[in-house]
Image (tube, helix red, strand yellow):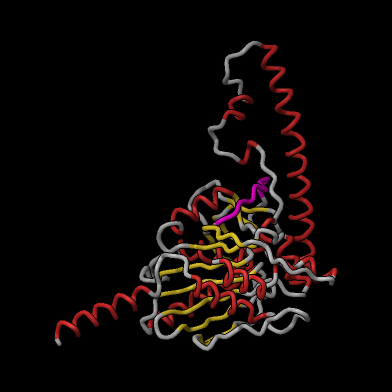
Amino acid sequence: MRIIIFFSLILYVSVSFGQFNQLFNKQEALDLVAICNYWVNGKIDGVDSTYIDTSEYKLLYESKPTKMDNIWQLWQKENDAVVINLRGTTSKSISWFENFYAAMIPAEGEMLLPDSQEVKYKFAENPNATIHTGWAIGVETMLPDILKHIKEVNKKGIYNVYITGFSQGGALVHLLRAALEYIPEEQLSSKNKFKVYSFAGPKPGNRFFAYDYASYTSIKNPSYSIINAEDWVPQVPFTIQSPDNMSEANPFIALENNDYKMSLFKRIFIKRIYYSMKKPVKKSQKRFKKVLGSDIEKKIKNTIGNFETPNNTDDFSYSPVGIQVILHPWKAKTNDKMLSIFWQHLPAHYYYLIKDQL
């Protein structure tokens, strides 16, 4: 009898601790995309959104909107974990300005937030890492409140934290996870374990940010990006890469510096080809920097007031982040021309694609 009780106890402990593991979990993905659908459930005509069932989860807290119209929620999953849910784009213009503010800034630096709070931010260790300006501001405005509530659940003995979001929220969750990685121990307990499920998220930074992010989310405390292959949102922002956006030791820079031994004729011929490709790219980067940087910045400041960020870089080499989980497209069609633009992007469709394909 004692042996049976002993092995039953071992089984109970292993199952209990196995609930928050490193592997992709279909039920977790279904639960979390359902929670993400909280923001739009029942609001889109002709789309079945009745599936959402959060009976295993309890909504503990919903933040007030920030000046960029970002909101986050805290849900409790039974007694051993909580969920941080970041809202996606809303119908307000400032929310779309946040998306279009896609000029990139260094992943570490200082900024003055729209609420006049000066902050030192860090999203990556790699000095070449750059990130989306608008979403960086969005995360930093929510971060103090998020840290406060993580500490509160830590006091209850809860250290398992899911982070999830859909669309714009799917990009924000990666940046939030990155920011949490570099919070000092005295501000955030190292006992916390984070697991990310990003749904339909755009690209939040360049490949050096993606490399840095993967260094702590690919094996332990994984970060998943669930993407419908026909959804256009995860394909943005546009990516423009020049040799200046690559590692410093590359053959193109060596060519510019005349490091290769070759005849004058060959050097002139090869450089002519090389610059005929590089110059249009650099011109496009300069144009993007103006339109998606200074021009959008003016519109945001006219809407919510002053703020300051580091100077935008010339980098637009956006890269996907996280462990990608790819879904086949939603087969049904719609005759609604406006809805068709987002037809492959709906949370309800992501739910059923996950349910049927994974």
Q: Quadrant of the N terminus?
A: bottom left
Could you tell whether 145 is left or right of 304 in the image?
Answer: left
**Residue 308 appears in view:** no
Could you tell whether 231 is left or right of 207 in the image?
Answer: right
Residue 38 at x, y percent in the picture: 63, 82
Task: Give the quadrant of residue 293.
Answer: bottom right
Residue 26 at x, y percent in the picture: 50, 71
Residue 136 at x, y percent in the picture: 61, 62
Residue in the image at 70% along x and 56% along y: 236
Magenta-tinted stretch: 313-321
Residue in the image at 24% along x and 82% along y: 8
**In the image shown, does 310 or 26 lie closer to the viewer?**
26
Q: Quadrant of the C terminus?
A: bottom right
**Residue 303 appears in view:** yes
Task: Give the quadrant of residue 36.
Answer: bottom right
Could you tell whether 144 is left or right of 301 in the image?
Answer: left
Could you tell whether 246 is left or right of 266 in the image?
Answer: left
**SS majority, magenta:** loop
